[in-house]
Every structure is written in C-alpha cells, then in structure tokens.
Image (tube, rainbow, N blue to C red):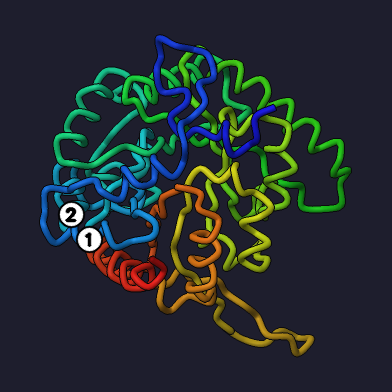
Amino acid sequence: MRSRRAIRCRRALCDKANQSMIPSGVRSARTAARRTHSLGSRNASAILKELAMELGVTAVMLPDLDFDEQLALMRECGVKYYQIRPRVIPAEQAGKPWNPWGNHKFDLTPQRLVKEGKAITKQVRDAGLELWGTLPHLSIETDADEVKMHMEGAAAAEAGAARCGMPRYPDGPFDYEDFLKKIVAGYERTVELAKPFGIKLIVETHCLSFATSPALAWNICRHFDPAQVGVIFDMANFTREGEITPHLAVSVLRDYIDCVHIGGGRRLVTGVDEFGCNVIENQMAPLNQSDLYLPPWLKALNDAQLGAPLIIEDFTPNMSGADRLRDSARVLQRALAGLG
C-alpha cells in the first residue's frame, strides 16, 4: 500500500482530461525543481535558490493593485506562487476604498475566471510565476451549480485546488460527533462535484471555523485521500484560536498540508472588565511583531519537508498591499535563509 506521502500530489488533479487520481513523483525532485526556478530577476532568483521553502501571496491582501501590478510586485519581492481570488465584490462595496474583504482593483469574478482562466495563467507563467489554488467564496453548503462553476474556473486556470469552507461551530454546547458527521458528509458531496474537474478541495484552519486547529482540521481531512482534500495551514489564525506547539501542529496534519498562510497578529489589552479581568482585542500585525514567534514554526515546516509554499497573507492595518508584501517577504527571506 502506498504511504500518504507517496500519494500526496499538489498537482495530481490538474489535468481536466484525466479525472483519475494521479500520484506525484518524488517530492524531493519536485522541491528541487522549485528551488531552481528562475523569476527572470537575478536578485530574486538568487534569493529563491537559498530558501528552504518558497514564497507565495494571496490576491486577497492586494486589493489596491490590478493584475499586472500584482505580478510585477511579486517578481520584485521574489515571490513565486499566486493564489487568485475569484469573488464577486459586494454591491455595497463598489466604489469604496480598496479593502481585502471588499472592493478590489482586480475585479476577478468566478464567471470571469471560467472565461479567462487560461489566459490569466498564461500571463502568470509568462512572468515566471505559478498559480497555487483559488480562494473563492465557496463552502460545503454552496449549491451544486455554483460549486461546479468554481471548479470549472479553477480547472480553466490549472490552479489545482480551490478553498472550500464549512459552517462555523455553534456558540453554545453541541454534539461534536454529530456535527462532524454532517461536515464530513458535506465534503464528501463537494469532492464528488469537484472530481470531474480534477480539482482538490482545501480546508483552511480558520479562526471561528469548525477546523480552527490542526487536530480539528485533521478530524475532517482524515476521511479523505490527501489528493482529494488538503489543508491551508493558516498560522495567522493561530494567533487568535487553535494554536499548539509547532512540531505537533505540523505532525498532526503533515501530508494534508497543501500550503501555509502566513501573517501576523497580536493581542492587545484594551481595558479591564467589572470582574477585574483584562479585556483583549485581536489586531493583525507585521510578521516580526506577531505574538506567534515565527522561527520555530518555520523550522517545524522545513523539517517536515512538505514541499508546501508559504503564502503571505498580511493584513496589517494602515499599510498598502505592496508595502505589506515587501516587508513580509524580507522578514521571511531573512528567517528562511538560515534553514538551508
């Protein structure tokens, strides 16, 4: 029987014409190929070849840049992988200031991705970059036709995977086992809808979600082949909920880790309540100012040799998307350079 590591394949389902599960090659060869990839910029290429893990960025954190500007910035920063954001801008956000969760300069709708996915991917690759999944508004509760549209768009762009969320956990006491069964059944349904398109579903360890911690995410994913359902290992969310020690967190999910979302956060004391307890507020923060101390997390991920990129998702307030990416890339490049 093949091990999970042998069957974990980030691009196993990319070929729409071949709907079967295709095992990956040897991960070390794949990782080596990534490390030698050239961005067309001598400085960026030199940086990437020294890194133990490669960097990416989500389009979600770049609302103030159009598509061409995003690609140019990635090349400048030595960032290789690009997660696209096929979402409809809410009507009430149209014309408002750029916002990661609202108005975006690059207005990529799911319908547009279906039509333009191939051309978008060509432009990304012509820039020496590569797509790594899509981040649509999609969940296991989404109706079948809409799920298929998102899968068609991801397949057109050869993105390989699409994030698929789930209902959040109830606010009060509930039957965990029963709720888990319903969530797993929802992913089973959505996996079947995704199969004809060759797209893998990725679950995010997101705060306030039913997969908020590594172990909770594993309880869902363990029912599936890692080529069908993987995990976005979201470290920024661990500053709010779900944190455990780095090597334990990575070991729990291991081959299910498709990519890592990396951003910073901190807890601020904003007052004292009537019981004399500190009132805490969560605030997004630069990586080097985060309450989540970065080096041991990077070491744990590097030691596991997952071949999963670090996708920067920095939402530090009062900064442009470009400045956030530049700063985060510098911090990560410096931290990773010593890992070898």
Tell us which disc is closer to us: 2 or 1. 2
Q: Quadrant of the C terminus?
A: bottom left
List x then y, in percent, for residue 211.
67, 47
Horizontal side of residue 156 vs 304, given as left or right: left
Q: Quadrant of the N terminus?
A: top right
Horizontal side of residue 173 vs 226, given as left or right: right
How many C-alpha atoms fall within 10 Å of the one at disc 2: few (<14), some, or many (≥20)?
some
Q: At 39% from the left edge and 62% from the top edge, which residue is drawn?
A: 315
- Disc 2 marks a residue whose amino acid type is Leu
Q: In the rendered image, which quarter is residue 121 located in? A: top left
Q: Are marks 2 and 1 in contact (CB under 8 Å)?
A: yes
Q: In the rendered image, which quarter is residue 269 located in? A: bottom right
Q: In the rendered image, which quarter is residue 241 located in? A: bottom right
How many C-alpha atoms fall within 10 Å of the one at disc 1: few (<14), some, or many (≥20)?
some
Question: From the viewer's perspective, is residue 326 above or below residue 86?
Answer: below
Q: At 51% from the left edge and 67% from the top edge, which residue is drawn?
A: 299
- State the SS at label 2: helix
Q: At 68% from the left edge and 37% from the top edge, which residue is drawn?
A: 221
Q: CA distance from mark 2 to mark 1?
A: 7 Å
- Circle 1 is placed at which residue position? 322
- Circle 2 is placed at which residue position? 73
Question: From the viewer's perspective, is residue 142 above or below residue 57?
Answer: above
List x then y, in percent, for residue 164.
55, 34
Q: At 44% from the left edge and 45% from the top edge, which residue is drawn?
A: 28
Question: From the viewer's perspective, is residue 32 above or below residue 240?
Answer: above
Mark 2 vs mark 1: which is more N-terminal? Answer: 2
Most foreground residue, 9 or 216: 9
- State the SS at label 1: helix
Most foreground residue, 126 or 48: 48
Q: Residue lying furthest bottom in this view?
A: 276
